[in-house]
Image (cartoon, grey):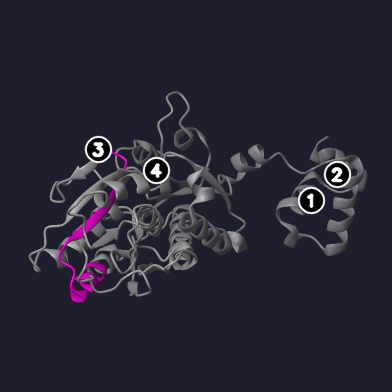
Amino acid sequence: MTLQTIADRVGVSRMTVSNAFSKPDQLSAALRSRILAAADELGYAGPDPTARALAKGTTGTIGIVLTSSLQYAFTDHIATSFLGAIAGQLAPTGLAITLLTSADSGAIVPARDLAMDGALIYSCDPTSSVVDVLARRRLPLVYVDQDPAPDISSVNVDDRTGARAAAQHLIDLGHRRIGLLLSGLHGPHGVVDPDVRPLDGHASRQRLQGWQDALRPAGITPQAVRQNGTGLEAARDGARLLLDRPDRPTAILCFSDVVAHGALQVAAELGIQVPRDLSLVGFDDNPIAVQVQPALTTVHQDVEAKGRAAADALTAAIAATRTSGTLTARHVLLPTGLVVRDSTAAPSSGTP
């Protein structure tokens, strides 16, 4: 079944049939309806997408590079909100989304092998080769939660300012024994020196720097634990290293609300009451922050605005590439803000 088969049935040219599928504005509504009805009657689904992509020089698809596990896109509230905002912003453009892992799986490298018109690099492992692969393909790119590059558009949130406000909040409450629950894929893990800078992602580094911006001038050297990843179980393991000790902190700054949730669970298991015995501060303002008890003090970021800004930056980059025009890279930095809830209070006089 081909376009010519439909053309012969309706009595029009092959190009007219093609336009009925790809350029409907070129035909009258009545003629297009006749062509589509004939195609439906003959069981023709439409032009082959691969051939059409070759002819147009565009795939109609963008890639989104995530962490090493695509499961993250469907289980993390922040990731799902980000992707939902992108999908909503792209809907009028007709662009489809392909999710790509940043893991190097040997012979199969989706970032190298899959056809796409551009890609968003979202919170990607800094050791991954995927970014270099996409750059060599000369695809339009946008970095999200990545270190900005001069010639590539980027969208970030002001992690450092938000983290500084979180640390200052605890200092103003009177806390001096403050713990940090850090996160990173690469070692070292466990109890770490907070001044040692391992290879971490952009958000991890910025949040640590923001905390230290407030802690250092106050003369506070925090106790720090670095966990492997951002999941709840890893958070529980890290929190136990901070809390199951005689000199435990009276407050903990957490990389995310999920990490803070893990610390909240461990505190309950150890008989430590929040916020009477322990103050906790998260980051992101994830929906979980108001679902747990007590509700978490956290740093809010507008994830949906980040998704919309990322989608707009990438469609602009793709449009500039198609028209052979030049595009000045845009660097968007979205604000963050401290949200004080019930998980923070002044340290108890009876805290050991």
Disc with the residue nearer the chain's start (1 vs 3)? 1
| Callout 1: SS | helix
Of tags 2 and 4, the one toward the viewer is 4
> Can I make out residue 54 in this image?
yes
| Callout 4: SS | loop
The residue furthest top is 107
**What residue span does the magenta drawing correspond to?**
165-189
The answer to whether the residue labelled 1 contacts the one labelled 2, judged by CB atoms less than 8 Å apart, is: yes
Q: Residue at x 26, y 59 (%)?
A: 207
Find disc 3 in the rendering and name its residue.
187
| Callout 3: SS | loop
Which residue type does callout 1 highlight? Thr
Which residue type does callout 2 highlight? Ala
Which residue type does callout 3 highlight? Gly
Find disc 1 in the rendering and name its residue.
16
Gap in angstroms between the C-alphas marked 1 and 2? 8 Å
Disc with the residue nearer the chain's start (2 vs 4)? 2
Between 332 and 207, the one nearer to me in the picture: 207
Q: Which residue is drawn at 32% across and 73% down?
A: 338
Find disc 2 in the rendering and name its residue.
7
The answer to whether the residue labelled 2 contacts the one labelled 4, judged by CB atoms less than 8 Å apart, is: no
Left or right: 254 as drawn, with respect to 139: left
The answer to whether the residue labelled 4 contacts the one labelled 3, judged by CB atoms less than 8 Å apart, is: no
Left or right: 205 as drawn, with respect to 113: left
Name the quadrant containing residue 265. Answer: bottom left
